[in-house]
Image (cartoon, grey):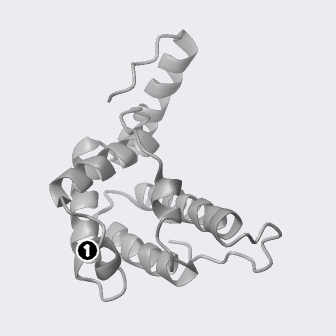
Amino acid sequence: MKHAAPTHPHAIAARADRQAEAQAMGIDADFIAALVDRFYAAVRTDADLGPIFGARVDDWPLHLGQMNRFWQSILLGTGSFTGNPMMKHLAIPALGQAHFERWLTLFYGTLREVAPTPEARNHIGAKARMIADSLLTGIRVHRDRDEALSSKVELPHV
């Protein structure tokens, strides 16, 4: 299900601004597709993350399409992603900080290889870290019931 395009002038202008900023850094739909494909190829062969994804992803083309829509929504403001990443991650019993650190390490490595500009690398890397931090914090609060967040989340930067 696709979201309707924004109709409010402010929303339309904000989306156009976000897309123009991304374009200026070299970020477009083709770049995002290449990033997603290359990153998840690395994930699938990774000793730590490969088995986690392999046990949950039955249809890789479908998953890659979903991840493309996710990153296009994040980076281009397309609004094309539907889903609940938090619930998906909460459902993985042993998922923890080490997994998010590994995910970021692979993601940053892919970014260093394919980012069209240093600005794109830094921008996308910061978004990835923010997402990982949010998911890990949500897991600690909702799944692990660590409402005080007794241990600080420390994830690597790009």
- Judge the density around disc 1: few (<14), some (14-19), many (≥20) Cα neighbours within 10 Å: some
Q: Residue at x 57, y 79 (%)?
A: 97
Q: Residue furthest right?
A: 148
Q: Residue at x 26, y 64 (%)?
A: 57
- Give whichever of 17, 107 is nearer the camera: 107
* Residue 87, horizontal then vertical, whole percent: 51, 55
Quadrant occupied by the N terminus: top left
* Residue 62, horizontal then vertical, whole percent: 20, 51
Asked whether, in this view, residue 155 is left or right of residue 104, the answer is right
Q: Could you say which quadrant of the image residue 154 lies in?
A: bottom right
In the picture shown, does residue 83 fall above or below 125?
A: above
Q: Which residue is mark 1?
A: 54
Q: Residue at x 50, y 71 (%)?
A: 158
Q: Could you say which quadrant of the image residue 4 lies in?
A: top left
Q: Secondary structure at mark 1?
A: helix
In the picture shown, does residue 15 fall above or below 34?
A: above
* Residue 47, horizontal then vertical, whole percent: 30, 89
Give the tally of numbered discs.
1
- Give whichever of 131, 140 is nearer the camera: 140
In the picture shown, does residue 83 fall above or below 147?
A: above
Kind of residue at badge 1: Gly
Q: Residue furthest bottom?
A: 47
- Give whichever of 93, 118 is nearer the camera: 93
* Residue 35, horizontal then vertical, whole percent: 27, 59
Q: Residue at x 61, y 67 (%)?
A: 139
Asked whether, in this view, residue 34 is left or right of residue 103, the answer is left
Asked whether, in this view, residue 74 is left or right of residue 45, the answer is right
